[in-house]
Image (tube, rainbow, N blue to C red):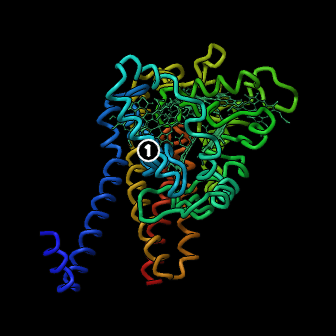
Amino acid sequence: MLKNVFDWCKQHIVIFTIISVVFVVFFGFINIQILHMTSEPEFCHLCHPAQGFGPLAEVDSWEHSAHGDAGVSCLDCHGRPGVVGYMKAKIGGLRDTYMQLTISKEEKLEILSNPHEDLVPSWHCLYCHSDEGNKTVRETTKGPMKVVNMRMLDDVVNPDFRERKGLADIMTDDFVGGTHFDHTLHIEEFDLTCRDCHFGVVHNPATATDRMNFCLACHADAGDDAPQVADCGVCHEAQKAMNVGTGIGDLDIPSMMYGDAADMTCVDCHTGVTKGTYRASSSTCTDCHEDEAYNEIFEEWAAETNARIDKLKEMRVELEAALADADAAKRDTTEVWKTYSQALRNLKFVRNDGTNGVHNNEYAIAILETVKADFKKAFTQLDSVW
Ligand code: HEC
Ligand code: HEC
Ligand code: HEC
Ligand code: HEC
Ligand code: HEC
Ligand code: HEC
Ligand code: HEC
Ligand code: HEC
């Protein structure tokens, strides 16, 4: 029987070869599909299914995070860069599956509640968030960076990636995410890791208040060189600039409720600071304006600005993709990049203020108008380079 098969193969060597190749390609394809499927958040969701934050809710919390929005997926953080890193993460996945079948619910919760402090090491974050960190990892990664398109991580080359996403190089810029903050100084001087401050990143419900308290552990009575609590504007550079109303293009629209004109400072609205409640709210408005309608003005300001930001976010994603296409086709996009980067910086400025225009509605709207105009201009410029 076997001999007959061999004989047939010999006589039909061409057909046999074709069948073999089809087989290999087919199974290779299925394998890759399996690797793909088992890397998707939907797959992780099978065993990490809870809603909200914390242990078991890792997929849901990711879905609502800035990383989730930006398309940074589980294995972009939970697998190291390169093909070897990817395969190691997949093998770790087999261990997860084995553990799922062998340990109790309580044991699983215990493990998930105490993630190892090196689960995602700082150098891994720096691979995406700094140029130097990216270079170092790319130079020292063994084996190929990628075989096929499996995830975002293996394509991250800085500064290109950062600029596309409008991100700062956190080790060289000291105005990041709206705050004046020198990462290099703090990380090197005090031996801190990313998680010490970004404990809220992705899965954790820690609030901005927790983060400010972390700073105040030192800054409540640090030496002369360090800003003190009362120096709100030194750390909150974006919020200060928003209140002052200058700095973007030639716009000059000071808030009517800040500075000399109204004789007001930050703590006139942020009245709870000394009691540890940093955030003001719509009820603050009626402390000074007796009419309840001022609560509604707050809501209207926030809703309008928020709706505009959402629209612009969609435009940004479209533009980023169109730019990538043009770059892939080797068009000269230098000018488009300039327009895009400026618009993105301004959009982030409004987002980073974090109040949806409440600090200075007129200024925020005016900036968002320039962003819209710049995005449109970039699309027109793109049309002309094709
Ligand atoms: C078959 C069920 C199952 C699936 C599917 C699954 N996990 Fe898990 N995961 C577990 C269990 C059980 C644990 C706790 C035991 C352990 O550490 O392996 C765990 C733990 C983890 C940990 C923490 C490990 C540690 O040492 O603290 C991470 C990170 C993780 N999973 C990520 C993922 C990602 C990412 C995916 C999707 C690509 C995924 N898991 C899919 C069952 C699963
Ligand atoms: C931006 C990087 C990043 C992304 C993306 C990310 N994680 Fe995590 N994950 C972390 C960090 C950092 C920790 C360590 C715990 C912490 O600091 O909250 C962690 C912890 C975990 C843990 C350990 C238990 C826990 O709750 O702390 C699990 C399980 C996990 N992640 C699963 C996932 C899954 C599933 C996805 C995709 C849906 C995902 N992660 C996406 C960074 C990330
Ligand atoms: C694959 C690349 C990648 C990795 C790895 C990565 N990030 Fe990010 N990160 C991004 C992108 C892209 C954004 C932009 C999100 C946006 O558009 O606002 C971002 C945003 C952020 C932000 C600002 C938004 C927020 O959630 O507060 C912080 C802080 C941050 N990352 C910290 C970290 C830390 C800490 C780690 C390691 C645990 C990490 N990142 C790992 C790509 C990455
Ligand atoms: C001492 C606290 C501290 C440590 C340690 C720290 N950060 Fe930050 N990080 C901040 C603060 C403060 C901001 C400003 C944004 C904000 O107000 O949350 C920030 C902002 C960022 C942003 C947002 C930048 C943007 O363009 O929006 C990223 C990304 C980031 N950090 C990554 C990291 C990474 C990666 C590490 C570890 C290498 C790290 N950080 C360590 C406090 C810290
Ligand atoms: C471990 C203590 C410690 C923590 C935690 C800490 N700082 Fe500092 N910070 C200092 C000291 C000390 C200085 C003065 C250092 C110097 O000038 O050489 C300083 C300086 C600064 C400065 C002025 C220097 C500069 O960057 O221009 C700013 C702004 C600042 N810190 C912001 C922050 C923020 C925001 C946080 C919280 C995310 C924070 N710090 C957390 C100790 C700390
Ligand atoms: C040493 C630097 C520093 C100083 C000084 C400082 N803050 Fe903060 N503050 C922070 C950081 C860091 C955060 C967290 C920001 C984030 O994660 O986006 C924060 C968060 C906040 C928040 C958001 C709280 C929340 O839970 O939503 C408010 C409001 C705030 N600060 C107001 C103030 C006011 C008002 C002052 C002056 C009285 C002040 N801060 C002084 C660093 C500082
Ligand atoms: C500490 C007192 C104070 C608080 C709190 C305050 N304002 Fe004002 N507001 C003022 C002053 C002072 C002016 C300037 C009055 C003028 O020039 O006529 C003003 C002006 C205004 C104006 C334009 C003039 C008017 O009266 O219609 C609006 C709108 C306004 N505030 C809305 C708000 C909203 C919304 C909030 C809550 C986020 C708020 N204010 C919180 C003191 C305050
Ligand atoms: C007219 C009142 C008013 C003044 C003046 C004001 N704020 Fe605010 N601020 C608010 C309100 C209200 C919120 C909360 C907005 C919300 O929840 O959408 C807020 C939110 C914030 C936040 C949190 C932003 C985030 O990312 O969540 C910070 C930080 C902040 N203010 C800092 C400042 C600083 C610094 C100054 C002075 C330069 C200042 N504020 C002046 C009313 C004010």
Q: Is residue 155 left or right of residue 275?
A: left
Q: Residue furthest right?
A: 224
Is any part of residue 301 visible from this angle? no
Residue at 41% x, 36% y is 95
Residue at 35% x, 53% y is 35
Name the one closer to the observer, 106 or 262: 106
Q: Is residue 255 left or right of residue 185?
A: left
* Res 259 quadrant in image: top right
Disc 1 marks which residue?
91
Residue 236 % position (x, y): 66, 37
Name the one closer to the observer, 297 or 380: 380
The residue tagged with tag 1: helix, strand or loop? helix
Q: Quadrant of the N terminus?
A: bottom left
Q: In this view, does 328 lie to the left or right of 261?
A: left
Name the one closer to the observer, 39 or 281: 39
Residue 336 % position (x, y): 53, 73
Q: In this view, does 228 lie to the left or right of 122?
A: right
Residue 291 % position (x, y): 43, 23
Mark 1 Cβ and ligand 1 under 8 Å apart = no
